[in-house]
Image (cartoon, rainbow, N blue to C red):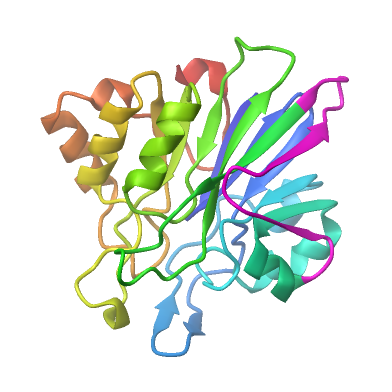
Amino acid sequence: MKMTYIGGPTALIEIAGLRILTDPTFDPPGGEYQAAAYSLFKTQDPAITRASVGHVDVVLLSHDHHFDNLDTSGRAMLSDVATVLTTQAGAERLGAPTRGLVPWQTHELALPDGGTLRITATPARHGPVDGDRGPVIGFVLQRLEDPSSETIYVSGDTVWYDGVAEVARRFPVTVAVLNMGAAHVAVAGPSHLTFTATEGVEFTRAFPTAIVVPLHYEGWAHFSESRREIDDAFRASGLDARLRWLQPGAATPIASLA
C-alpha cells in the first residue's frame, strides 16, 4: 500500500496493484474558475502531471460541483477510468462510468492479487449545518482478507461534525486522509467549508488509532489555513507525532506512516 501526494485534494493510493485517485485536479496554476456567486483561483502546479500518473483504476470523487475537487483536466480523465465513485447527485450529472453512493453504502472491487477491497461511503458536511455546500461523501477503504491491514479513511470536503465522529465508532481507522485548509468563499460568510487545524486536532483525539495525512491545504487561493497553521495546532495539542506530511510526487509506503 502506497500513497503519493499530487496537490490540493489529489492523491494516488495504491493497494495490491489497484490504483485509486482522490478528487482529480491536474490543471496548471493561474486559472480562474467561475461558480454561480464566486470565483476560485488555482495557484500551484500538480506535483505529477496527468500523463505521468498513468493508468487509474478508481476515482474517489467527494463531489463534482466544485472545481478545486474536480478541475477541467480531472473531469476530462473520468471517461478513462473503469470505476468512479461519488455522490448520487454527482453521478446523475456526470453519467457513466460514475456510480453514486449514499453514506454507509459499500462497493467492492477485485484486487489484482485476488483479494477484495471494500469501499464504504461515509457522511460529510461541506460547511455549517445551515450552509452545507454539498452534497459530499467520504470513503473508507478496507482489504477484506487481511484484518491487520491498514483501514484508510478519505474524508472528502467536510467539517468536523457528528457524521464524521460516527466513522470512528464504526471503523478502526489507521490512516486518515483529511481535506483541511479551512476553505472559505465569500458567499458562505465567515464559515469554513473544510477541516480547520483545530478540527483536525479534535478529529485526531476522536480517532485514537489513526495517523493523519493532510490534503487540501495548498494550491488554491480560497484555502485559508496552510501547513504552518496545521503544524502549530497539532504541536500545541501534543499530537504532532500523529501528523504525517507526504512529499509531493513521492510514493510513500503507507506502513511507514504508522
Q: Position of residue 35 (x, y in %)?
A: 48, 85
Q: Is residue 171 left or right of residue 238?
A: right
Q: Quadrant of residue 185?
A: bottom left
> Residue at coordinates 11% horizontally, 32% vertically from top-left?
236
**Please, which residue is most extreme toward the left here?**
236
Q: Is residue 90 above or below residue 24?
A: below
| Residue 246 seen by the camera | no
Q: Is residue 84 above or below residue 95?
A: above
Q: Position of residue 71 (x, y in %)?
A: 60, 70
> Residue at coordinates 23% horizontally, 68% vertically from top-left?
191
Q: Is residue 10 above or below residue 98?
A: above
Whether the magenta-drawn stretch holds residue 97 is answered as: yes
Give whichever of 141, 219 is nearer the camera: 141
Q: Position of residue 218 (x, y in %)?
A: 38, 56
> Residue at coordinates 47% horizontally, 67% vertically from top-left?
134
**Magenta part of the protein: which range?**
95-116
Q: Quadrant of residue 241?
A: top left
> Residue at coordinates 32% horizontally, 23% vertically from top-left?
242
Whether the magenta-drawn stretch holds residue 256 is answered as: no
Q: Is residue 208 above or below residue 57?
A: above
Q: Is residue 227 left or right of residue 96?
A: left
Q: Is residue 148 left or right of residue 203?
A: right
Quadrant in the picture for the C terminus: top left
Q: Quadrant of residue 86?
A: bottom right
| Residue 1 seen by the camera | yes
Q: Position of residue 229 (x, y in %)?
A: 20, 47
